[in-house]
């Protein structure tokens, strides 16, 4: 049976093994994908990477040092394949995100990352402000919700307006890149250093 490039590619995506190993496995198993997966596992080559739902396990570390050397950022951005990780658009995105973090100093990636106690404290502060301003009780939750949205824009990277085009949020930018590259892309973690800043 002829082993095609698409068969090799599909096996590679399912197992995480190298192209040559996948080709050899398919040749050894007469093109049977299930047998080839088992063959790779027996040889200890396959990472047995199940793709029930897409996994973003490849990627790069983007970095940015502000011109005066006073601010530095490292950000890990994941994608599904090494091929996309090497893509110019993906690498440019990583650099732009590192610059965004340097300029806008987010604390979290998304609202889901904010600890519950921090969120509750913010809500309490906003509610107390409303009461002090004499706002009617029934509209306070709505005002608190609006203030929380502004809070997310300040502290959550994905909700921040993009520094190069404030009509877009970082989430919009990410969605655009996913549409262009056709893979799941995740901003996984970041660290921002600033000379002389106090550590928590």
Image (cartoon, rainbow, N blue to C red):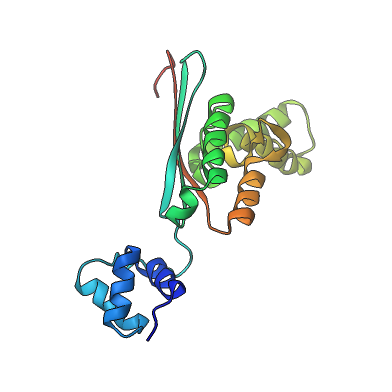
Please give left or right for residue 16 compared with residue 144 in the image. Answer: left
Q: Image quadrant for the N terminus? A: bottom left
Q: Is residue 189 visible?
A: yes
User: x%, y% of residue 147?
Assistant: 69, 35
Please give left or right for residue 139 compared with residue 151 in the image. Answer: right
Please give left or right for residue 54 compared with residue 19 in the image. Answer: right
User: x%, y% of residue 38?
Assistant: 27, 78
Of residues 150 and 64, the one nearer the viewer is 64
Of residues 152 and 123, the one nearer the viewer is 152
Of residues 100 and 196, the one nearer the viewer is 100
Please give left or right for residue 115 compared with residue 125 in the image. Answer: left
Against 34, residue 79 (above or below) is: above
Q: Within the image, what quadrant is residue 138 found in?
A: top right
Q: Within the image, what quadrant is residue 106 found in?
A: top right
Q: Is residue 110 visible?
A: no
Against 64, residue 75 (above or below) is: below
Q: Residue at the spot x=69%, y=28% of the render?
A: 129
Q: Residue at the spot x=53%, y=47% of the render?
A: 112
């Amino acid at each position: 049976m002829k082993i095609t490039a698409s068969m090799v590619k599909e096996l590679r995506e399912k197992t995480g093994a190298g192209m040559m190993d996948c080709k050899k496995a398919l040749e050894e198993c007469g093109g049977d994908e299930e047998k080839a997966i088992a063959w790779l596992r027996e040889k200890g080559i396959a990472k047995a990477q199940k793709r029930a739902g897409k996994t973003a396990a490849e990627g790069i570390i983007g970095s940015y040092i502000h011109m005066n050397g006073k601010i530095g950022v490292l950000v890990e951005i994941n994608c599904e394949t090494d091929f996309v990780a090497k893509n110019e658009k993906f690498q440019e995105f990583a650099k732009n995100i590192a610059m965004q973090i340097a300029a806008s100093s987010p604390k979290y990636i998304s609202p889901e990352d904010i600890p519950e106690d921090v969120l509750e404290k913010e809500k309490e502060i906003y509610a107390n402000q409303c009461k002090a301003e004499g706002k009617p009780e029934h509209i306070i939750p709505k005002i608190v919700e609006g203030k929380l949205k502004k809070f997310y824009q300040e502290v959550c990277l994905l909700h921040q307006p993009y520094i190069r085009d404030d009509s877009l949020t970082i989430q919009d930018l990410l969605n655009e890149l996913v549409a262009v590259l056709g893979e799941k892309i995740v901003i996984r973690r970041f660290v921002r250093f600033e000379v002389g800043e106090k550590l928590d």
